[in-house]
Image (spheres, rainbow, N blue to C red):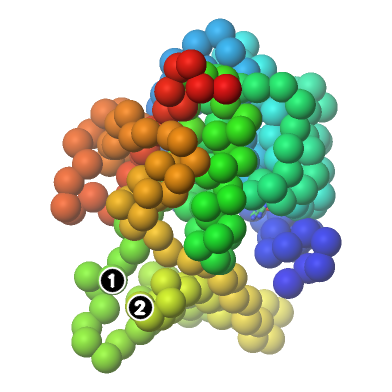
Amino acid sequence: MDDQDGYFGERVAAGYDESSGEMFEPGVIGTTVDFLADLAGGGRALELGIGTGRVALPLARRAVRVHGIDLSRAMVARLRAKPGGDAIGVTIGDFATTRVDGTFSVVYLLYNTIMNLTTQAEQVACFRNAAAHLEPGGCFVIEVMIPELRKLPAGQNVVPFHVSPTRWAFDTYDVATQATSSNYVEVVDGRGEYRSIPFRYVWPSELDLMAQLAGLRLRERWDGWTGEAFTSESARHVSVWEKPAGRP
Ligand SMILES: C[S@@+](CC[C@H](N)C(=O)[O-])C[C@H]1O[C@@H](n2cnc3c(N)ncnc32)[C@H](O)[C@@H]1O
């Protein structure tokens, strides 16, 4: 791990936007931005873990005033280098505890990033921090995967998700502690490299309880950004909790 930038140091940041993953497809980014822009109305938006601005930049182009918090200077440098990147305010810090000025009509946390907080206490602190930034009636949005425990036969704790001649990737799960990790083994210039990122997996019901502790209540939960129903087969969810109007 890079001390200053957490698990998103220079090397990860340099390749982040090169991903061919679904999250980088223009259609997926478009529906994400539509959803968040609708929720923001004419108000401000705060992205926790803004990264390279994958979503913040197109959201800002929709005339939403976006601010971000991120630990990684390396990721934020990529955001800054993109057109419009220098117009977005970013505070360097831990999004579980860092406060920024003003209030927001939407605070959002995408792409499994709640799982980067590796203890329950940090995840609860994040909900409280999000709630503290919301104006009454404002919403906190999280996009996160459903833990893939149904892929684990009894006695096994590893879920492979990529196999190729030069790259292997797998998740590990500890069902006693909810600790999980994503692991990557790659052959680069004839040498093997290994990288591991720790996470804490979390169920929708536990997130609802964290929201309750922070004074928020569930408004809606979807399978994705275009209003697909959330079901027992959903692989992820987009959840929206609101701060009741009249609450400071
Ligand atoms: C998977 S990337 C997501 C970036 C962006 N939100 C997106 O959707 O493309 C996670 C980001 O969260 C940041 N991050 C992880 N844990 C953090 C924490 N505790 N406080 C602040 N930023 C954090 C990382 O530096 C990284 O930029």
Left of 191 or right of it: where is 10?
right
Separation of residues labelled 2 and 1 (CA atoms): 8 Å
Amino acid tagged 1: Leu
Is 119 situated above or below 29?
below
Q: Secondary structure at mark 2?
A: loop
The picture places residue 65, in percent across and down from the top left corner, at 66, 17
Residue to which mark 2 is pinned: 175
Q: Secondary structure at mark 1?
A: helix
Q: Is residue 224 visible?
A: yes
> Residue 66's image quarter?
top right
Mark drawn on residue 109:
none
Amino acid tagged 2: Val
Q: Nearer the viewer, residue 174 or 215?
A: 215
Residue to which mark 1 is pinned: 149
The picture places residue 209, in percent across and down from the top left corner, at 37, 49
Left of 215 or right of it: where is 233?
left
Q: Nearer the viewer, residue 173 or 191?
A: 173
The picture places residue 128, in percent across and down from the top left corner, at 56, 42
Task: Mark 2 vs mark 1: give the one in front.
Answer: 2
Q: Are marks 2 and 1 in contact (CB under 8 Å)?
A: yes
Q: Residue at x 70, y 28 (%)?
A: 67
Is 10 situated above or below 209?
below
